[in-house]
Amino acid sequence: MSQAQTSDVREDGVIESVSGPVVTATDLDARMNDVVYVGSEGLMGEVIEIEGDITTIQVYEETSGVSPGEPVESTGQPLTVDLGPGMLDSIYDGVQRPLDVLESKMNSAFLDRGVDAPGIDLEKTWEFTPDIEEGETVTRGDILGTVPETASIDHKVMVPPDVLEEGETAEVSSIEAGEFTVEETVAELDDGSEIKMRQEWPVREARPAAEKETPTEPLVSGQRILDGLFPIAKGGTAAIPGPFGSGKTVTQHQLAKWADADIVVYVGCGERGNEMTEVIEDFPELEDPKTGKPLMSRTCLIANTSNMPVAARESCVYTGITIAEYFRDMGYDVALMADSTSRWAEAMREISSRLEEMPGEEGYPAYLAARLSEFYERAGYFQNVNGTEGSVSVIGAVSPPGGDFSEPVTQNTLRIVKTFWALDADLAERRHFPSINWNESYSLYRDQLDPWFVENVRDDWPEQRQWAIDTLDEEAELQEIVQLVGKDALPDDQQLTLEVARYLREAWLQQNAFHDVDTYCSPEKTYLILEAIKTFNDEAFDALDAGVPVEEITDIESVPRLNRIGVQEDYEEYVDELEDDITSELREKY
């Protein structure tokens, strides 16, 4: 965070009381959402309530030892993030303090209170190449030049949205190539404005865009069940609710690694420290499948674990979405993973109870739904003010206690998001991964994304998918009968339907995240696996109609090979041979 570097803080308040992360102060000259420094150690906090002479502050650090009578300093600025080159390949805490910088300051993995550092390196120089010339006219958001931020991403230096009013233009009076720090001026406008690589933006305020459009392109995830049955659009919203151990985090890791987004912002919000440690250790080691370079070169991590102060957890999702919007303004497609929004809601609940606000359902604040909407509504596919197009896709994990989807966070999230990937503990126990329940999940983006799949994959994509959905629905109904009377009591055609549905589940919906080949499945491969199962279905029912016993149909040698398509690199040739073998074996029987 940058308030300490950019504002003259002034000692103008005194602590009256301390209740966990909530501190009240008197005689403080501050506005709502201003950042303040609390106590003799200068702990960072934010004004959340003003009543008469009493100012209530939520402190982003541990407050033990802070006592009444200590000073409070106001910066006069809201909570902001530093935006500029250097954010990628970085790991921040919930208020954008770089953890590696803090660790080197402290010579320890355990951070002292009151320690601070700017969100981006103020001394490092970057090679700036102008994209426009002196004398050209620009407006807010326009791209002035580029900086090679990482091996994968070129950073676009833009006119900050708050330099010019909407519709106002200015002429570039000077701009030059060279090496600059983020604090040095790279361009000047004729109205006297000096443009630097570094911007600041309040985290609770959405960055401006020209227009929000209906997304028509999928965020291809490489996961068969998601791309095949429940796709999400670029600029869409999705929720992954599920109980402990059902695979939320692994699913988000897969999306972070394989989704065809340009930039990934991963927010670890209140998750267990060992899980976040795994992310922090694994991500720098992962290779970007697109470029062969480290995945971190297009990733920004925000880590706010469950043992970190609860108040910073409430701000970390805003920090993440603001960084995502900044890269969207450059024309990039950004995927933001929030793991998990339940912990964020719990932080709001704790702070709300300390403020003695009227509780809503299950003790959550009455404004829970509004805050969730506020967050998810910042996703979308946008026409940016500079003429580029960009998107922010938000995928939020939800951790309902005991896997109860009727609890308030899950229910309020479902009212907002358009894609619902319901994780199932029973599937996880049966080692079916990803353990997404196909009977409970849904996507409201299917119809608007079908034209893309028809154009880029196959003409009959929607029909094939609908056949799979119908078969799985029929299986769900038949399973209830099977539990009562047994499979053998069913007619032959229903027994065959159960066998086809088994291959849909095992060969198509299951996917091994830890297999070198099966970890990613292109839409083309997703289609071909489904096509092979459909070929078996059609040929099997033809054989049944010709009088072949169902036992002979299901016992043919080639059909178990359906389960091995996912791990084949040369899958097209494999599928062609397999379909021929299935067809010839079954037709020989009649």
Image (cartoon, rainbow, N blue to C red):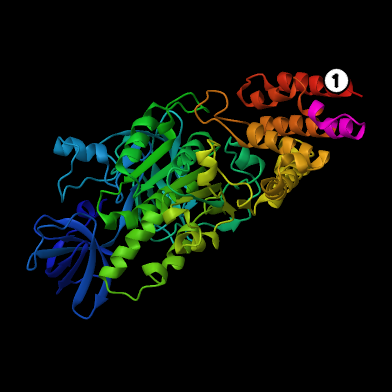
The answer to whether residue 526 is above or below residue 61 is: above
The quadrant where residue 186 appears: top left
**Was residue 549 drawn as part of the magenta stretch in this picture?**
yes
Residue farthest to the bottom, as pictured: 52
Horizontal arrangement in the rendering, residue 266 relative to residue 377 (left or right): left
Horizontal arrangement in the rendering, residue 11 relative to residue 358 (left or right): left
Magenta-colored span: 539-552
Residue 39 placement (x, y as % from top left): 11, 60
Q: Is residue 63 visible?
A: yes
Which residue is depicted at the point 53% across and 44% down? Answer: 426
Please tell me which residue lies in front, 288 or 369: 369
Q: How many numbered discs sit on the rendered protein?
A: 1
Q: Secondary structure at mark 1?
A: helix
Q: Is residue 166 visible?
A: no
Which residue is depicted at the point 69% across and 33% down? Answer: 503
Please tell me which residue lies in front, 132 or 587: 587
**Secondary structure predominantly adopted by residues drawn in magenta:** helix
| Circle 1: residue type | Ser
The quadrant where residue 569 appears: top right
Pointer 1: residues within 10 angstroms few (<14), some, or many (20+)?
A: few
The quarter of the rendered structure image containing the C terminus is top right
Please tell me which residue lies in front, 123 or 494: 494
The answer to whether residue 163 is above or below residue 492 is: below
The answer to whether residue 299 is above or below residue 61 is: above
Which residue is depicted at the point 27% across and 64% down? Answer: 34
Residue 278 placement (x, y as % from top left): 35, 34
Residue 554 placement (x, y as % from top left): 77, 28
Residue 81 placement (x, y as % from top left): 33, 51
The residue labelled by disc 1 is 584
Which residue is depicted at the point 41% across and 43% down? Answer: 266
**Was residue 174 drawn as part of the magenta stretch in this picture?**
no
